[in-house]
Image: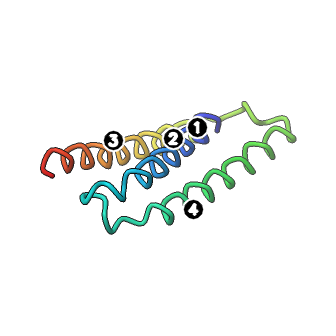
Amino acid sequence: MEFLALGILGKLALWDALKVLQPADECLQGMNFDHLATRAREQYARVEERRLAGGKNGSATTLNYEKAVAINCQLSLFFTHHRSVFLMFVNCRRIC
């Protein structure tokens, strides 16, 4: 759960950084970084709630194989998606 929480915080940092750059970069115009940041904060809150609840039950570090595979799959999708977003941004910068 810690890695998932860190990934979400990384995504939040990306949205915040792109929002700062938005006024000076026409490629970023029209993107709603506030909405994306809000979603990331909500996702982080849900993950933290589950992480902390697991710790109270003594099961925070206990994962069965299916849960571990599901978390790995979610992390892979998360990083694949956000790598694509970053590459789109880099490519957009080259075009503009």
* Residue at (24, 58) in percent of width and height: 27
- Mark 2 lies on residue: 10
Q: Find out whether the residues at labels 2 and 1 contact each other: C-beta distance under 8 Å.
A: yes
* Residue at (72, 32) in percent of width and height: 62
Q: Quarter of the image containing the N terminus? A: top right
Please determine whether, in this image, residue 26 is positioned above or below residue 95.
below
Q: Earlier in the sequence, mark 4 or mark 2?
A: 2
Please identify the residue farthest to the front as the structure is shown. Answer: 24
Q: In front here: 87 or 94?
A: 94
Q: Find out whether the residues at labels 1 and 4 contact each other: C-beta distance under 8 Å.
A: no
- Mark 4 lies on residue: 38
Label 1, label 4: how far apart the Cα atoms are: 16 Å
Please identify the residue farthest to the top as the structure is shown. Answer: 61
- Mark 1 lies on residue: 6
Q: Is residue 87 left or right of residue 43?
A: left
- Give amino acid for label 3: Arg
Residue 38's x, y, as percent?
57, 62
- Give amino acid for label 1: Leu
Q: Earlier in the sequence, mark 3 or mark 1?
A: 1
Q: Nearer the viewer, mark 2 or mark 1?
A: 2
Task: Estimate how packed mark 4 is, as few (under 14), some (14 to 19) or many (20 or more) residues with alpha carbons within 10 Å.
Answer: few
Q: Is residue 46 left or right of residue 93?
A: right
Q: Find out whether the residues at labels 4 and 3 contact each other: C-beta distance under 8 Å.
A: no
Callout 2: SS: helix
Callout 3: SS: helix
Label 2, label 1: how far apart the Cα atoms are: 6 Å
Image disc number at residue 83: 3
Q: Nearer the viewer, mark 1 or mark 4?
A: 4
